[in-house]
Amino acid sequence: MKEAKQMSVSAIENGTVIDHVPAKNLFKVIQILGLDRIDNQITFGTNLESKKLGRKAIIKITGVFFEDEDINRIALVAPDAKLNIIRDYEVVEKKVVEVPDTIVGIAKCMNPKCITNFESVTTRFRVVSKKNVSLKCHYCEKITTQENMEII
Ligand code: CTP
Ligand code: ZN
């Protein structure tokens, strides 16, 4: 049996560890942060046990330190994510994600008649509620709630 303390993915020297990502949204986080398009070393583990999330994923990116603005883009798919900033193998800072005031791309407008659903226009929303996330479309003004939110 595995030791409880054992790390599932090895430690990194410098970079960012994103912990508490819901396993089902791991690849969405990778896509939103553009991790599929960088040359840095990335390791991840998924379907790890988590008391809070059931199954979580963890992503370790060597040599990358994100701007808060970029990191907050994952709030819709990983609201409980914890970021650990690593320097010289030590955790020097911990951050949580915050739902931003506006969301560009990422989510689909639930209004089938919205221009964003039949022309190639990037979706754009104002966040009208951060707790139970609900988004107001910049184009059609319809509200997309968490329940009917579809991630693009
Ligand atoms: N970590 C890492 N490389 C390091 C140091 C830490 O990959 N050089 C990872 C750990 O594996 C862990 C995360 O960064 O997943 C946070 O590290 P730490 O704060 O030491 O762990 P915990 O106390 O378990 O964090 P928390 O309870 O805040 O989730
Ligand atoms: Zn719309």
Image (cartoon, rainbow, N blue to C red):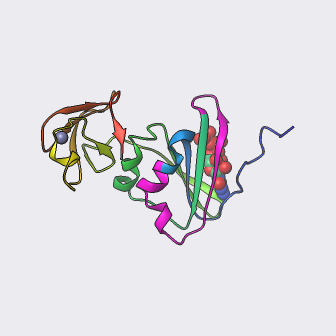
Does residue 64 appear in the picture of this structure?
Answer: yes
Viewed as shown, does residue 62 lie left or right of 130? right
Q: Residue at x 33, y 34 (%)?
A: 149
Q: Please state, as top left, top right, bottom left or bottom right, where the N terminus lies in the image.
A: top right
In the image shown, does 92 or 103 lie closer to the viewer? 103
**In the image, residue 32 lies in the stretch drawn in magenta:** yes
Q: Give the image location of residue 23, x and y in percent.
A: 57, 40
Does residue 22 appear in the picture of this structure?
Answer: no
When the figure is inspected, residue 72 is found, relative to residue 63, above or below; the finding is: above
Over which residues does the magenta segment extend?
A: 28-54
Q: Give the image location of residue 112, x and y in percent.
A: 21, 37
Residue at the limit of the structure toward the bottom, as seen here: 39
Q: How many marks?
A: 0
Q: Give the image location of residue 67, x and y in percent.
A: 38, 58
Q: Residue at x 65, y 61 (%)?
A: 12
Residue at the limit of the structure toward the right, as seen here: 1
Q: Residue at x 63, y 57 (%)?
A: 90
Viewed as shown, does residue 98 lie left or right of 89? left
Place residue 136 in its image quadrant: top left
**In the image, residue 10 lies in the stretch drawn in magenta:** no
Q: Give the image location of residue 116, x and y in percent.
A: 20, 48
Ligand 2 position by quadrant: top left
Q: Residue at x 37, y 55 (%)?
A: 70
Viewed as shown, does residue 36 lie left or right of 46? left
Place residue 56 in its image quadrant: top right
Place residue 140 in its image quadrant: top left
